[in-house]
């Protein structure tokens, strides 16, 4: 048996870190480097673990992730950053293997990788193939609406929904947020979606733990060349042909399904795209369905880790 790859999760006690650790714990091809108690916040201990790792996965707030990178001086240590800190930074490779046909090779060669945001991954997966296929212009005024389970907000939001004291608990069934239309994923969607202008993005949180729906409306009658829903669907099928973790639902899914449930793909690393359409009106809405803690966070980090260490891409997923 070949030697196990060493992996250090900096921020293992957080929501994403715990999920990654859970996916890796039983694997015999990975040795998890772990710090206990106060050592998790000790810079010297973290520096030692970061530099001892073949792969360091950062599950930290943005400033702490930037600091962690400065602690690494071992050129062999490769980094997957699950924070927002480096998602549009030069020199960092975007950790979405299905982005295009060359992205896996870019990732295999990279030492610094930014793990996508959950909303952003689905939005980019919807928008970019249409631009690449010439069905949508880069300057199109893209709108994104989405709803996520409350786990996307981390431990503080989970506590506010589940066990906050009276008067501090969130009692809403759902609510919109990022009301200034400046959500932290907008720069990421703009850059990797290859958009000329930032999209209008309004996210919402629902009273359920995890799962996500991301919606991008397409007025087909107003788009360049007036593409059909069939053309849109074909573009996705071509772009994601043969992919294990990105699937495209049948074009008639809107007529067959009674509802789209944001929790249907929980516990998986799958992103499923649905092209809902009304031919008579020339309307379509593309919906990305995923687990915000799976393909939208920890599952995607493990998929990328597998690429880096030469494991089967679906190992542990």
Image: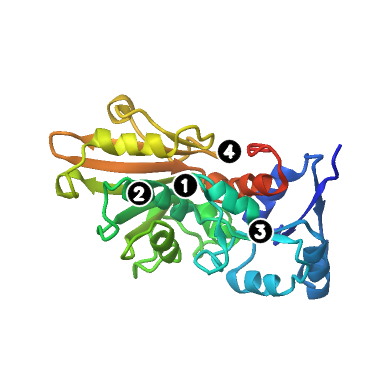
Q: Earlier along the polypeptide chain: callout 4 or callout 1?
A: 1
Q: Nearer the viewer, mark 4 or mark 2?
A: 2
How crowded pointer 2 is (Cα within 10 Å; few <14, some 14-19, many 20+) is rated as some
Q: Nearer the viewer, mark 4 or mark 1?
A: 1
The residue lying toward the viewer, choosing from 61 and 219, is: 219
Label disc, if present, on residue 132 of the rendered structure: 2
How much space separates mark 2 and mark 1, taking CA atoms?
Answer: 10 Å
The residue lying toward the viewer, choosing from 55 and 76, is: 76
Q: Nearer the viewer, mark 3 or mark 2?
A: 2
The image quarter in which residue 22 lies:
top right
Q: Secondary structure at mark 3?
A: loop
Label disc, if present, on residue 14 of the rendered structure: 3
Q: What residue does disc 4 label?
A: 267
Q: Secondary structure at mark 1?
A: loop
Name the residue located 71 percent from the left edge and 40 percent from the top edge.
Answer: 311
The C terminus lies in quadrant? top right
Q: Earlier along the polypeptide chain: callout 2 or callout 1?
A: 1
Q: What residue does disc 1 label?
A: 100
Label disc, if present, on residue 254 of the rendered structure: none
Q: Earlier along the polypeptide chain: callout 3 or callout 2?
A: 3
How crowded pointer 1 is (Cα within 10 Å; few <14, some 14-19, many 20+) is rated as some
The N terminus lies in quadrant? top right
Q: Give yes or no for contact between labels 2 and 1 (Cβ–Cβ under 8 Å).
A: yes
């Amino acid at each position: 048996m070949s030697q196990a790859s060493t992996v250090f999760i900096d921020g293992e006690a957080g929501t994403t870190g715990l999920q990654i650790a859970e996916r890796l714990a039983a694997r015999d091809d990975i040795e998890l480097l772990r710090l206990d108690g106060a050592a998790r916040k000790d810079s010297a201990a973290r520096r030692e673990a970061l530099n001892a790792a073949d792969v360091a996965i950062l599950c930290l707030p943005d400033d702490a992730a930037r600091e962690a990178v400065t602690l690494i001086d071992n050129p062999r240590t490769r980094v997957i950053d699950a924070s927002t800190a480096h998602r549009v930074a030069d020199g960092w490779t975007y950790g979405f293997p299905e982005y295009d046909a060359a992205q896996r090779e870019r990732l295999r060669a990279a030492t610094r990788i930014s793990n996508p945001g959950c909303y952003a991954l689905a939005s980019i997966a919807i928008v970019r193939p249409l631009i690449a296929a010439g069905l949508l212009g880069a300057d199109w005024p893209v709108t994104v609406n989405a709803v996520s389970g409350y786990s996307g907000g981390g431990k503080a939001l989970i506590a506010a929904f589940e066990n906050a004291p009276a008067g501090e608990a969130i009692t809403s069934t759902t609510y919109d947020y990022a009301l200034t239309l400046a959500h932290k994923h907008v720069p990421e969607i703009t850059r990797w979606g290859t958009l000329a202008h930032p999209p209008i993005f309004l996210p919402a949180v629902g009273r359920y733990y995890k799962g996500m729906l991301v919606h991008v409306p397409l007025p087909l009658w107003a788009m360049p060349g007036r593409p059909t829903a069939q053309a849109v669907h074909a573009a996705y099928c071509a772009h994601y042909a043969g992919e294990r973790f990105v699937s495209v639902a049948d074009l008639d899914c809107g007529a067959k399904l009674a509802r789209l449930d944001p929790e249907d793909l929980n516990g998986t690393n799958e992103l499923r795209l649905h092209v809902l359409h009304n031919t008579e009106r020339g309307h379509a809405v593309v919906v990305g369905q995923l687990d915000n803690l799976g393909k939208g966070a920890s599952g995607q980090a493990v998929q990328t880790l597998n690429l880096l260490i030469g494991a089967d891409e679906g190992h542990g997923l």
